[in-house]
């Protein structure tokens, strides 16, 4: 592992890869190519190895796990190598803290997997009916409200479940998240298992919730334990996975997630079923946490208060700092958010970021649920120089962690299940923000805390249900023509106290009018928000405002009939009339 360029401090990041996984993949691929394995059987195998079919039949998507979102310089460089080995010039960060490489010919998959393996990165169980990437709060250990650092416990859970027999063919995918505080920045309440850090009588533990999820029928997670000591965490998580393996619906993949088990049984029976499974796990022999390597945060780099006054006064730096810098609970240090529009980053930027992370932070970066990167342990005096270094490689964009930082799934550019080109909508909104009038710009500044999330279909890979302004792609028939539209979801979000609140479905809008609708909604907030006794937040406002008022404001934008201009029947970024094209998705293969 690389070391900090200034202190020589060894940085430890765990490895999860095994070269045998790649050897097995190549051997099974050759079997398939010789006709010795059915396409269905091969699909199940390759998905569990992180190789996923795309809308385009001759290419694959490679998804690599980034457990708890943590990467060092070796991992950043290896990902750059893997992207280039695949013949690509960009990779994509997801809302599950993963990295994806799209449009990879099958004959280049092995080279990419080998490049990742060199740095301990794996694609094992990144797709398919398995336990997916275990995510964690990227500010764990450094945010002001951190209870304790949860990353080591996420590492332990990852190691405990990875490659286990009972994790290879679950009824459906299974997601786990850990939050370092009650604020639930990891969105535990929409995961199959969520662990929220708590301390009781001086001892560490977790609130355990389960059976949350989004997609077409979103559900808030059920509480299993208000407090479970950390030493019992592995047994608890294993019990929930085993319960799902035993009771999940294997006949109907569209009703197979853990939330449907809980809905069918009811909360009380679901908790009882879990307790029975936990007892069975314990009876077979518990797995103490001490059997898994648990590593705490490394010591911080030395504080260096050598801020350049001239650089620190530059408008571009001040704008970046206002939105992208978060003070740590450790005095003198800060986190810096690296905004990646729509989650995209190039191999050159990944390579350039590696020495920047070593020079200015603890040598690591963290991926986020918002498809960005976070540098931690940055001495505050180094922030201007960090901004200049990021600016040199095109990674010092302003607007991180604000309404301008739009989240989107890949959409119909590559996904077989997507209806619309959601990434293109994200770009359309960004373009509209660049052309705001002075009054509209003022409204945007007031609404900077709002969130916008987009999915290309109802399945919510872009997490549109839990955004202040969420949109999912759909189709609307007008006579014999089809128009690409987006359903507006208003006032969603995840709060520490109440868990998930799912946005209200209000109105459908033609794709090319959504950006204008966003600006009108932000202006509505600016004009009609409560200001006393304290200014109303965008989230509170969009939960309060009536659907009738929103329809009144957006009414003309929603009209879609025989008089509608032809351009509204063409999806964003496309040519020719919109045509619904859905393939056989592999999410439930």
Image: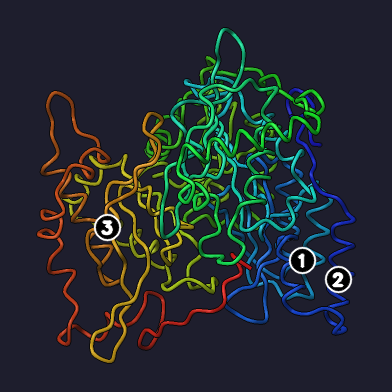
- Between residue 184 and residue 313, name the one nearer to us: 184
Residue placed most toward the observer, 407 or 44? 44
* 216 and 133: which is toward the camera: 216
- Identify the residue at the far top of this view: 201
Residue at (55% x, 37% y) in the render: 194
User: On the picture, is 15 further left or further right than 466?
Assistant: right
Q: Is residue 68 left or right of residue 461?
A: right
The residue singled out by tag 2 in the image is: 28
Say above or below: 104 vs 156.
below
**Which mark, by number, is residue 45?**
1
Q: Are marks 1 and 2 in contact (CB under 8 Å)?
A: yes
User: Badge 3: how crowded within 10 Å, few (<14), some, or many (20+)?
Assistant: some
Contact, CB < 8 Å: mark 3 with mark 2?
Answer: no
Q: Quadrant of residue 476?
A: bottom left
Label 2 element class? helix
Mark 3 or 2, nearer chain start: 2
Classify mark 1: helix, strand or loop. helix
Occupied quadrant, residue 43: bottom right
Question: Which numbered dot is residue 497?
Answer: none
Lower position in the chain sequence, tag 1 or tag 2: 2
Asked if the residues shown at circle 1 and circle 3 are in contact, with their CB atoms under 8 angstroms apart, the answer is no
Q: Residue 257 location in percent, x, y?
A: 55, 55
Residue 562's spot in the image, x, y percent?
17, 87
Q: Which residue is pictured at 32% across the width and 39% down the height?
A: 449
Q: Which residue is mark 3?
A: 505
Q: Image quarter for residue 256?
A: bottom right
**CA distance for labels 1 and 3:** 38 Å
- The residue at 73%/60% (across/down) is 48
Q: Where residue 466 appears, x then y in whole percent?
A: 38, 47
Quadrant of the image containing the C terminus? bottom right
Q: Can you say which quadrant of the picture contains the N terminus?
A: top right
- Residue 573: x and y in percent read 41, 76
């Amino acid at each position: 592992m690389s070391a900090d360029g200034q202190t020589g401090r060894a940085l430890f990041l765990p490895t999860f890869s095994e070269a045998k996984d790649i050897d097995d993949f190549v051997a099974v691929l050759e079997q398939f190519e010789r006709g010795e394995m059915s396409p269905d059987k091969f699909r199940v195998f390759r998905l569990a190895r992180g190789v996923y079919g795309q809308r385009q039949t001759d290419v694959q998507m490679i998804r690599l796990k980034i457990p708890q979102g943590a990467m060092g310089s070796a991992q950043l460089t290896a990902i750059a190598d893997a992207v280039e080995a695949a013949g690509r010039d960009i990779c994509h960060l997801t809302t599950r803290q993963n990295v994806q490489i799209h449009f990879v010919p099958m004959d280049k998959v092995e080279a990419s997997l080998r490049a990742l393996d060199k740095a301990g990165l794996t694609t094992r169980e990144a797709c398919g009916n398995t336990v997916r990437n275990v995510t964690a709060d990227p500010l764990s250990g450094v945010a002001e409200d951190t209870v304790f650092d949860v990353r080591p416990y996420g590492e332990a859970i990852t190691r405990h479940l990875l490659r286990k027999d009972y994790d290879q063919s679950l009824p459906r995918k299974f997601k786990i998240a850990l939050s370092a505080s009650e604020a639930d920045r990891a969105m535990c309440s929409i995961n199959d298992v969520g662990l929220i850090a708590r301390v009781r009588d001086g001892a560490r533990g977790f609130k355990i919730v389960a059976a949350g999820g989004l997609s077409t029928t979103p559900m808030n997670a059920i509480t299993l334990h208000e407090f479970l000591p950390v030493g019992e965490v592995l047994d608890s998580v294993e019990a929930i996975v085993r319960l799902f393996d035993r009771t999940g619906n294997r006949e109907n993949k569209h009703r197979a997630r853990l939330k449907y088990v809980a809905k069918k049984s009811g909360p009380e029976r679901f908790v009882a079923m879990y307790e029975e499974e936990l007892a069975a796990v314990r009876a077979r022999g518990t797995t103490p946490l001490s059997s898994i390597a648990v590593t705490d945060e490394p010591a911080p780099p030395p504080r260096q208060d050598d801020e350049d006054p001239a650089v620190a006064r530059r408008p571009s730096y001040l704008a970046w700092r206002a939105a992208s810098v978060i003070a740590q609970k450790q005095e003198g240090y800060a986190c810096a958010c690296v905004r990646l529009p729509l989650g995209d980053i190039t191999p050159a930027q990944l390579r350039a970021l590696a020495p920047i992370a070593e020079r200015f932070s603890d040598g690591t970066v963290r991926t986020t649920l918002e498809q960005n990167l976070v540098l931690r342990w940055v001495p505050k005096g180094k922030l201007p120089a960090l901004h200049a270094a990021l600016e040199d490689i095109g990674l010092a964009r302003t607007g991180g962690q604000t309404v301008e930082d739009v989240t989107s799934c890949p959409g119909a550019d590559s996904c077989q299940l997507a209806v619309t080109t959601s990434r293109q909508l994200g770009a359309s909104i960004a373009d509209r923000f660049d052309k705001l009038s002075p009054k509209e710009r003022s409204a945007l500044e007031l609404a900077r805390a709002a969130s916008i999330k987009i999915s290309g279909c109802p399945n919510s890979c872009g997490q549109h249900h839990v955004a202040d302004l969420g949109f999912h792609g759909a189709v609307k028939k007008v006579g014999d023509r089809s128009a690409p539209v987006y359903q507006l979801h208003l006032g969603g979000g995840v709060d520490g106290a109440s868990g998930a609140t799912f946005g209200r479905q209000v109105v459908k809008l033609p794709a090319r009018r959504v950006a204008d609708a966003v600006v009108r909604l932000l202006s509505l907030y600016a004009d009609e928000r409560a200001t006393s006794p304290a200014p109303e937040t965008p989230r509170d406002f969009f939960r309060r405002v009536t659907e009738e008022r929103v329809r009144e404001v957006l009414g003309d934008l929603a009209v879609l009939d025989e008089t509608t201009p032809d351009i509204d029947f063409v999806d964003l970024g496309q040519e020719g009339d919109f045509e619904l094209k859905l393939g056989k998705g592999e999410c439930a293969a």
